[in-house]
Amino acid sequence: MSIYAGLLTPYELNRSLTEQEIANQLHQWEAHPDNPLIHDNDTVIKMNSTYMEIVDRYYAVKGFPSLLVGAFTISFILGFIFFIVRFFERYVLSDKYQWEFDDIWVWPTVFSMMIFIIWFCLRIILKVWFQKTHYPIRFNRKNKMVYVYQVDGTILSVPWKSIFFTTYDGVSKTSAWRGWGIDGHILADDGFTVLKTFSLPYYSSLEELSGYWEFIRCYMEEDVLEDLAKTIDMCPPIADRKEGYLFGLQYQFRYSSKWEWIRLLGLPYELIENFTRYVAMQTSRIPQWPEQVEAACKVDSDDPFDVRYKSNKLNLWRYTFACLSQEHHRKKREVLERIRNKVGKRYKENY
């Protein structure tokens, strides 16, 4: 399944679960057998005692489809113009060339191909531009419901315990860019037929997915909310406003260590991709939850937890370039270990 499934291509629905999906199921109310250190991968928009809202699968790569397709379209148009100019120079403007009736059919064919390619490219671009800035997912800790803002604008509301979560292979097994993601399937009464699908935002190696899954599961099931809030470093500022160019650039870089500074060699490309991301954000609308969802997710006025962009105390540029202090990393590691130990003690019979 592609990383863009559900956006550029539809999910495969009304089908049976695959053997891989069954084998890789992620179970609610069970700690992951690896007992990994959790991480949110900067996907949390806001979190409180009632609900946690995260970004969608396509948010991190918002600018790439339009950049790729736009570059192809521009290259194609320039190539077509060059072809037209050369054709006129060599044949139309030449006294030596004699026109024949069959030559008339060349132009309708060429123009038809051009129109089709431009239409195809615009169709992809318009799936990213003039849509929604993001498609949020809400996990309600109190009523144990999950609310998914789908690409078509409808809201999927489903009990936490009823979702079949599993990992999926996002790229061909023969690809050097193989990656994995987490899908949530809504099954029919037979417990085997997929009716609806949505995707969690994190996309990485299979080994690293367990830490992200445990982050989601711990929020919904474990008594570690205070520590969980301390593990979140960056919240996208998109709950009630559109993402700006600078934050988009920060979000795209996000180095995990100073060794990754070598990626600065690709800065020109990143600046261009972030521009297409910025255009996508500015031409799109901010998603609005219906009143029923907002009522179900009403936050207490005295809620002790309010994690969001405004509560970010870190210097985001230092965070982006992996320049936070050793003291910060030490404290965060202590919190992560505390969560892991607490979960491990509760499910110690599993290890």
Image: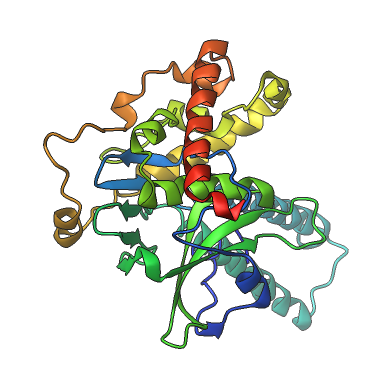
Residue 209 image offset from top left, x and y in percent: 60, 49
**For residue 283, above or below residue 200:** above
Please state if 94 lies on the left or on the right of 20 as rendered.
right
View extreme (left): residue: 301
Residue 215 image offset from top left, x and y in percent: 47, 45
Residue 145 image offset from top left, x and y in percent: 30, 61
Q: Residue at x 37, y 36 (%)?
A: 243
Rendering colour mode: rainbow
**Residue 183 visible (yes or no):** yes
- The image shows a total of numbered marks equal to 0
**For residue 240, above or below residue 115:** above
Q: Residue at x 37, y 55 (%)?
A: 131
Instruction: Out of 256 and 86, give the one closest to the viewer.
Output: 256
**Residue 62 visible (yes or no):** no
View extreme (right): residue: 96
View extreme (bottom): residue: 190
Q: Residue at x 65, y 33 (%)?
A: 269
Instruction: Out of 32 and 261, give the one closest to the viewer.
Output: 32
Q: Residue at x 51, y 72 (%)?
A: 10
Displayed quadrant of residue 187:
bottom left
Displayed quadrant of residue 282:
top left
Look at the image and tell me in which quarter the N terminus lies.
bottom right
Please state if 1 lies on the left or on the right of 98 as rendered.
left
**For residue 178, above or below residue 223:** below
Instruction: Out of 148 and 159, give the one closest to the viewer.
Output: 159
Residue 229 image offset from top left, x and y in percent: 37, 33
Instruction: Out of 140 and 97, give the one closest to the viewer.
Output: 140
